Amino acid sequence: MRQALLLAGLLAAGCGGRVWDLAQPIYIDVAADTPKAAMFALGLQHAIEATGGTVSPDKVAQRIFLIRGNDKDCKVGTVAFTDTSPGKWDTVGICDSQALLNFSQAYADTNAGHEWLHVAAGRRDHLPCETRAIMAAYSDCHGLVPFQPPDFEYLCSTGNVHGGRCQHEHDAAPDL
Ligand SMILES: [Zn+2]
């Protein structure tokens, strides 16, 4: 049976978020009761590394939080979501759903990667299904990671992300 998993319950367009410097390390703060905590923490690490950042085992200033999603945020079919309420944007919730039962690391990498791009770019919206990008809304629209070129455009589009994969974007600006 084909199942369209909605990767994040938030479809409204808009952006917010905070500034991320991928030249500086990031600490992944994992709540102990996060479903599949180790898999999703590793997934986030892989996603951060794929965008040119590094993860630190030390509690450095830049932090991303991994928590257990509550019933309000975990709608049917949702695996993971980004908290886009004011002052958040650094928190990814994991829903304790049936979908996690036979989850592979590649699926965790893909879901964590999708949420990392919401967090880093500060964007709630998704790319069209036809792009086949990881930032398309539904898992049926794309394969597993790696990120596709439109995903990196999404990452760097808001100017929230400095360094890493967005370094080139900034360097390319004309030096007037
Ligand atoms: Zn999403």
Image (tube, grey):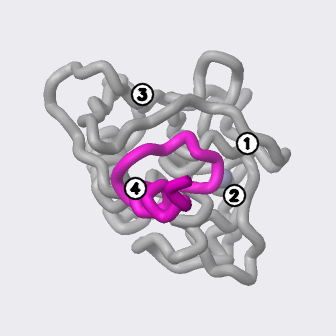
Q: Please provide percent x and percent y for residue 89.
A: 58, 29
Amino acid type, callout 4: Gln
Judged by depth in the image, the label closer to the viewer, 1 or 2, is 2
Q: Tell me the element at label 4.
A: helix
Residue found at the far right of this picture: 12
Image height of 130 relative to 15, above or below? below
Q: Nearer the viewer, mark 4 or mark 1?
A: 4
Looking at the rendered structure, the kind of residue marked 2 is: Leu
Circle 3: is it few (<14), some (14-19), or many (20+) Cα within 10 Å?
A: some
- Which residue position holds label 3? 65
Q: Earlier in the sequence, mark 2 or mark 4?
A: 2
Helix, strand or loop status at disc 1: loop
Q: Is residue 99 visible?
A: no
The span from disc 4 to disc 1 (Cα, nearest Å) is 36 Å
Give the magenta range. 156-176
Q: Are marks 1 and 2 in contact (CB under 8 Å)?
A: yes
Task: Tell us which disc is closer to us: 3 or 2.
Answer: 3
Check disc 1 and report the residue beneath it.
75
Q: Nearer the viewer, mark 1 or mark 3?
A: 3
Q: Is mark 1 within 8 Å of ligand 1?
A: no
